Image: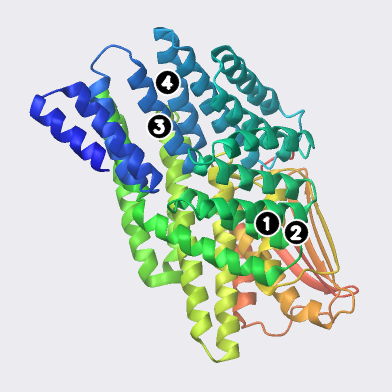
């Protein structure tokens, strides 16, 4: 920080715009390392404002690479790829092999995040060839330049890909990169600590939790030698959660999940994504004033949504459905305005991301409140409300992580709902059969179906499974022409739905079924069976 401040003073005194751009770039790196993404984005944008008025240069491409890295850390894969492509074009125009090598790596990083977000491990997936295309291009240039550091970093990137594909080649590449950083540990503490984490994840993917734990402990010993980094700290917590899940130590997994949630809440307060988006729009406006008219309506909608989100934190569950309705309305608006530029698609995804984050904050607040309650009935009610909110968060995560902006992939959505309820109650049924036709469901219908399934699953975990010797859960969804039928069954003591008609759960099911214009009912057959049928225009895959 001191060096950047001194450089800024010198640039101001000498009226040297090139030096001032360098100072802004250094400030951006400092704030990026501290995970203060808002400040980092501000300084990178200032540097671009100076450098874009000049001829293409290595420094200009370098700033775009940093912005690509910044977007990658925030899981904005599309923006990460966009900035990396811009940097690559600049380096190709000026003939910089080193710049091209780094840009290929940034492109690979962006596509890796998309590939992993889709939970892919299939090498036949189209993205697999794209990933290796950029990885091989970067590796070829690294050997051509005889850049040992780059070769080590690319080896780790290749090892990560193989680990996600559950291929033991991952260990060969990861250990090659780790050995390089260990030889020069004083210079590369950050990279060495990060490599140990990646190696631990590789062992977990290969079903070797004991070796994963050893790698994590080794990484922590390195981590303690350097200043705390939020990015590394978060990766340690995430990997410990995976380790304890793999060893079925669920209390420990929950403990680390709470630590991760606290850290992400801290980062969320420092990184206002709405402000970052406004900076991006301001920069684009300086380049093309013509975009102002096309984006004016979207900016007003985003401002209104931000006000709704602040109110959401204060009033809780009552405004939750209103926020979701605003999100669905936003998607419908997007479909009607097909002529609006690609920038609008990015705005929609960012809006959903903010709603999802606020849902997580509300869930955390309910969890904290439940811990302070002494009445068990009140705590149980609070936990059920938390499960409902988390089902909404799952819906929004499904929306912004997929290419379909207003549709949810039903098999993944249902599986994640079941996993979420199981984690909330701390155990799984003895047998779990989920058979969902591969299909997409509109966002508004997915919202209603998600609330119904959440109530049914919560009821099964509360009343059916504790009384069953060998608990069984069956869920099926079948698309027959234009009718979708969903069946949820358990082997509990049985319930026909005629009692407790005034309970909150039954009222929620009744209300959501009415909005779906659906038929539904309960019956007893070796437990409780619920069926739901409604018209669905979305075709199966």
How far, Cα to Cα, is label 2 from label 4?
A: 40 Å
Relative image position of residue 74 (x, y in whole percent): 46, 44
Residue receiving disc 4? 87
How far, Cα to Cα, is label 1 from label 4?
A: 35 Å
For mark 1, give the secondary structure: helix
First in sequence, mark 1 or 3: give its number.
3
Which residue, as the protein is rendered here, is positioned at the far left? 13
What residue lies at 36% left-to-right and 27% top-to-bottom? 63
First in sequence, mark 3 or 2: give its number.
3
The label shown at residue 371 is none
The label shown at residue 242 is 1
How far, Cα to Cα, is label 1 from label 2?
A: 6 Å
What residue lies at 86% left-to-right and 75% top-to-bottom? 527
Q: Which of 459 and 359 lies nearest the eye of the viewer?
A: 359
First in sequence, mark 2 or 4: give its number.
4
Residue receiving disc 3? 66
């Amino acid at each position: 920080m001191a060096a950047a401040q001194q450089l800024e003073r010198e640039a101001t005194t000498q009226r040297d715009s090139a030096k001032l751009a360098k100072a802004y770039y250094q400030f951006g790196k400092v704030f990026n390392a501290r995970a203060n993404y808002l400040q980092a984005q501000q300084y990178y944008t200032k540097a671009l404002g100076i450098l874009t008025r000049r001829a293409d240069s290595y420094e200009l491409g370098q700033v775009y690479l940093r912005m690509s890295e910044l977007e990658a850390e925030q899981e904005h894969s599309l923006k990460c790829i966009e900035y990396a492509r811009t940097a690559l074009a600049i380096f190709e125009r000026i003939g910089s092999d080193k710049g091209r090598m780094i840009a290929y790596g940034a492109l690979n990083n962006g596509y890796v995040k998309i590939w992993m977000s889709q939970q892919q491990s299939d090498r036949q997936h189209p993205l697999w060839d794209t990933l290796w295309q950029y990885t091989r291009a970067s590796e070829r240039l690294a050997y051509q330049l005889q850049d040992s550091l780059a070769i080590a970093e690319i080896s780790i990137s290749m090892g990560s890909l193989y680990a996600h594909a559950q291929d033991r080649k991952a260990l060969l590449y990861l250990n090659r990169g780790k050995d390089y950083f260990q030889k020069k540990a004083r210079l590369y503490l950050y990279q060495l600590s990060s490599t140990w984490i990646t190696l631990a994840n590789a062992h977990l993917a290969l079903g070797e939790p004991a070796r994963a734990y050893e790698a994590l402990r080794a990484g922590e010993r390195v981590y303690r030698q350097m200043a705390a980094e939020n990015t590394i700290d978060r990766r340690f917590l995430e990997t410990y959660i995976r380790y304890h899940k793999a060893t079925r130590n669920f209390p420990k997994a929950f403990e680390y999940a709470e630590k991760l949630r606290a850290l992400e809440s801290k980062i969320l307060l420092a990184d206002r994504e709405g402000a970052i988006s406004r900076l991006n729009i301001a920069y684009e406006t300086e380049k093309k004033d013509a975009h102002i008219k096309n984006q004016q309506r979207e900016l007003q909608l985003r401002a209104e949504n931000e006000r709704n989100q602040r109110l959401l934190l204060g009033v809780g569950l009552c405004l939750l459905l209103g926020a979701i309705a605003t999100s669905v309305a936003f998607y419908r608006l997007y479909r009607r305005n097909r002529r609006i530029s690609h920038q609008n698609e990015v705005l929609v995804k960012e809006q959903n991301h903010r709603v999802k984050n606020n849902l997580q904050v509300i869930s955390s607040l309910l969890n904290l409140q439940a811990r302070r309650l002494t009445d068990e009935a009140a705590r149980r009610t609070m936990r059920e409300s938390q499960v409902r909110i988390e089902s909404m968060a799952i819906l929004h995560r499904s929306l912004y992580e997929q290419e379909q902006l207003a549709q949810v992939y039903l098999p993944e959505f249902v599986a994640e709902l079941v996993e979420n309820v199981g984690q909330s109650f701390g155990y799984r049924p003895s047998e779990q059969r989920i058979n969902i036709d591969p299909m997409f469901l509109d966002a508004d219908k997915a919202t209603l179906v998600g609330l119904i399934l959440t109530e049914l699953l919560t009821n099964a975990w509360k009343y059916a499974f504790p009384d069953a010797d060998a608990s069984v859960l069956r869920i099926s969804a079948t698309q027959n022409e234009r009718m979708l039928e969903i069946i949820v069954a358990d082997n509990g003591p049985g319930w026909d739905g005629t009692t407790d008609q005034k309970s909150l759960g039954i009222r929620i099911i009744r209300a959501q079924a009415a909005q779906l214009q659906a038929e539904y009912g309960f019956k007893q057959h070796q437990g409780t069976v619920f069926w739901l049928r409604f018209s669905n225009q979305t075709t199966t895959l």
